[in-house]
Image (cartoon, rainbow, N blue to C red):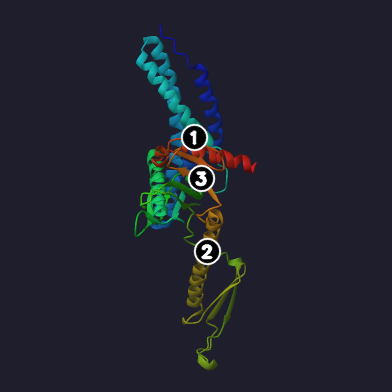
């Protein structure tokens, strides 16, 4: 008689899932989706393409996150039904299927549980990943390409869309650098622990002496930032001065106060305009220039924030965070967490969830 009892295991899954659901805040997520869906359905949505893109992207992110949670709950319910059917029908095949699904669910729940540790300001955003070859010649550029493939395969395993933004190929093997975007919820928080210097040790396929070669590559991870597409300038932030336009040598151009000087009080930016014939035209032109300068300033601030988040990565001895050994012991070891994988081939094929989860837990403990 078949007696498949997974009661405790399923109860444990439900308990952890309940914690995940509370952290994700499903009710708030549904409210966001309803609001964004209404905005996305507005007839005038694409009158402002930049804002439309922002709305549809935010809607897609939240729908994806809700789907992950609701699908997980459904799978736990289905597992309970499968166990009951297996016992009622005394079907060993169904029992095997139930045990396999339990193992898969435990892995999925563990991954989502790690996501609940991602509470940084930018953690929910997508990620832009840049890989640069470091010291090591052809081995380093080849290693950089191996790392790029590793992350692309990881994204493929999770069905995450990837947009390769730039690739600089080396003259010999591999790549000098590559940048790609994974714009899904929590991609930045998840992949940010991959940032740092990666070290590869192996018998070089590019040398004739069969000597061990050590090479390096740097991985930089920054969040996808919402581009500043327009700048709202409150009237209270502007001081307006009008004066008469003048030509070369102080010659009067006209006898009316048509020239306009705008001073943005918070930043001190000053824009003067006197080319137009009327004060109204000069003010409108000056405002356009002021908004453009403020837009550029905001982008510079965002770029500075990205650089701060990315940190300084040298891709050389002394600061590596992970080592990949492809000779002798065949091992991948994270030097921060101590987490090891004895099969580098699977790691380079994108199976890095264990390394990432260990990194996230390590960072959380360190920050606490």
Q: Is residue 156 visible?
A: yes
Mark 1 or mark 3: whose residue is earlier in sequence: 1
Q: In the structure shown, which secondary structural element does the residue marked by tag 2 occupy?
A: helix
Q: Whole-percent x and y of residue 233? A: 55, 65
Figure label count: 3
Q: Whole-percent x and y of residue 18? A: 54, 28
Q: Whole-percent x and y of residue 281? A: 47, 76
Q: Who's the residue at 41% across and 51% down the image?
A: 144
Against 187, is 257 above or below? below
Q: Residues within 10 Å of mark 3 (few under 14, many from 20)?
A: many
Mark 1 or mark 2: whose residue is earlier in sequence: 1
Mark 3 or mark 2: whose residue is earlier in sequence: 2
Q: Looking at this rendering, what residue extends furthest in the right direction?
A: 368
Q: In the structure shown, which secondary structural element does the residue marked by tag 1 occupy?
A: helix
Circle nearer the viewer, 1 or 3: 3
Q: CA distance from mark 1 to mark 3?
A: 21 Å
Q: CA distance from mark 1 to mark 2?
A: 35 Å
Compare residues 31 and 13 and report the one nearer the observer. Answer: 13
Q: Which residue is mark 3?
A: 322
Q: Quadrant of residue 23?
A: top right
Q: Residues within 10 Å of mark 2 (few under 14, many from 20)?
A: few
Q: Residues within 10 Å of mark 1 (few under 14, many from 20)?
A: some
Q: Quadrant of residue 51?
A: bottom left
Residue 61's label in the rendered image is none
Q: Looking at this rendering, what residue extends furthest in the top direction?
A: 1
Circle nearer the viewer, 1 or 2: 1
Circle nearer the viewer, 3 or 2: 3
Quarter of the picture holding the N terminus? top left
Residue 300's label in the rendered image is 2
Q: Quadrant of residue 176?
A: bottom left
Residue 111's label in the rendered image is 1
């Amino acid at each position: 008689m078949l007696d498949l009892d997974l009661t405790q295991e399923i109860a444990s899954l439900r308990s952890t899932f309940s914690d995940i659901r509370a952290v994700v805040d499903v009710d708030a997520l549904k409210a966001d989706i309803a609001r964004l869906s209404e905005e996305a359905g507005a007839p005038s949505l694409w009158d402002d393409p930049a804002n439309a893109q922002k709305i549809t992207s935010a809607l897609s992110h939240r729908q994806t996150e809700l789907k992950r949670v609701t699908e997980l709950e459904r799978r736990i319910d289905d597992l309970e039904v499968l166990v009951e059917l297996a016992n009622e029908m005394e079907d060993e095949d169904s029992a095997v299927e139930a045990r396999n699904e339990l193992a898969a669910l435990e892995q999925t729940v563990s991954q989502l549980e790690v996501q609940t540790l991602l509470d940084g300001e930018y953690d929910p955003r997508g990620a832009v990943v840049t890989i640069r070859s470091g010291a090591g010649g052809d081995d380093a550029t080849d290693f950089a390409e191996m790392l790029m493939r590793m992350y692309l395969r990881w994204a493929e395993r999770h069905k995450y869309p990837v947009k390769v933004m730039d690739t600089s190929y080396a003259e010999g093997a591999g790549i000098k650098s590559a940048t790609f975007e994974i714009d899904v919820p929590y991609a930045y928080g998840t992949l940010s622990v991959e940032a740092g210097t990666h070290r590869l040790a192996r018998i070089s396929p590019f040398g004739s002496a069969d000597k061990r070669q050590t090479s390096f590559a740097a991985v930089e991870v920054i969040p996808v930032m919402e581009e500043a597409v327009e700048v709202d300038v409150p009237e209270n932030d502007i001081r307006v001065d009008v004066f008469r336009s003048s030509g070369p040598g102080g010659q009067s151009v006209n006898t009316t106060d048509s020239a306009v000087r705008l001073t943005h009080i918070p930043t001190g930016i000053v824009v003067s305009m006197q080319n137009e014939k009327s004060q109204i035209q000069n003010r409108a032109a000056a405002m356009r220039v002021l908004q453009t300068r403020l837009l550029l300033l905001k982008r510079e601030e965002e770029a500075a924030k990205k650089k701060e988040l990315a940190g300084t990565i040298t891709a050389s001895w002394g600061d590596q965070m992970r080592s990949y050994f492809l000779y002798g012991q065949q091992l991948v070891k994270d030097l921060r967490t101590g987490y090891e994988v004895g099969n580098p081939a699977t790691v380079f094929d994108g199976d890095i969830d264990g390394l990432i989860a260990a990194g996230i837990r390590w960072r959380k403990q360190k920050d606490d």
